[in-house]
Amino acid sequence: MLTIAIIDRHPTARLDLSSILRQHFDDISLLLSRNGKTFHKTFPDAEPNLIILGFAHPRGASGRDALQQITLYQHPEKIIILDEDPHPEVIMFYLRANVKGYISKRKTTGEIVDCIKTALDGQMYIGLDTLELLIENFTVKIRGVGGDWGSTSSFD
């Protein structure tokens, strides 16, 4: 049986994602929780195949705070981040922490299901819009440090 934990501070988000998962996966067990500490208390012996961690950037919190909560109990390579408002710095933190997937909450149901299936197959998934955001941010930082990379210099 496939076991997926959904950890999100918004009850409606947890229920909506539960409904989507039940429609797309047979023989599935879902473990729903508001946060990592509650998850551990409610399901102390759980070993889900995947954890979907919803993140909404509450004031004063960082990606580091959210991931730190859950990594006390699970390996980051079992985690998909479902982010409400992606920021390049937070995305990079999660990717460096070796999460299995990163996707915006604004994506279609199909894209979110693709992310989950890809992660369950052991591969990393990053949404195209997230990659574009990272590339745009990386390009801006390079130009700010090393000049205009758009010039056409000859290397002959």
Image (cartoon, helix red, strand yellow):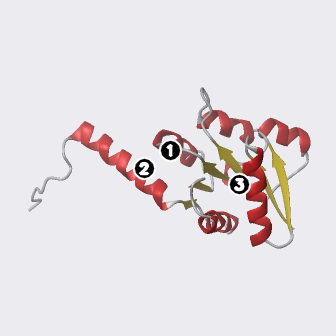
In-front residue for pair 97/109: 109
Assign a secondary structure to mark 3: helix
Q: Position of residue 123 (x, y in %)?
A: 61, 65
Is 109 displayed left or right of 20 in the figure? Answer: left
Instruction: Specify whether residue 25 is in view.
Output: yes
- Residue under circle 2? 134
Instruction: Specify whether residue 50 is in view.
Output: no
Whether label 3 touches label 1, CB < 8 Å: no
Q: Any mark on residue 132, and which?
A: none
Q: Position of residue 83 (x, y in %)?
A: 60, 48
Is 150 displayed left or right of 8 in the figure? Answer: left
What residue lies at 83% left-to-right and 42% top-to-bottom?
39
Assign a secondary structure to mark 1: helix
What's the distance in space between the residues labelled 3 and 1, CA to CA?
Answer: 17 Å
Instruction: Determine whether 113 is above or below 102 in the image.
Output: below
Is 6 displayed left or right of 63 in the figure? Answer: right
What's the distance in space between the residues labelled 1 and 2, CA to CA?
Answer: 8 Å
Q: Closer to us: mark 1 or mark 2?
A: 2
What residue lies at 78% left-to-right and 62% top-to-bottom?
19
Marks 1 and 2, the one that precedes in the sequence: 1
Whether label 1 touches label 2, CB < 8 Å: yes
Q: Where is residue 22 in the image (x, y as percent from the top left)?
A: 80, 67
What residue lies at 50% left-to-right and 44% top-to-bottom?
92
Q: Any mark on residue 92, and which?
A: 1
- Residue under circle 3? 78
What residue lies at 32% left-to-right and 40% top-to-bottom?
141
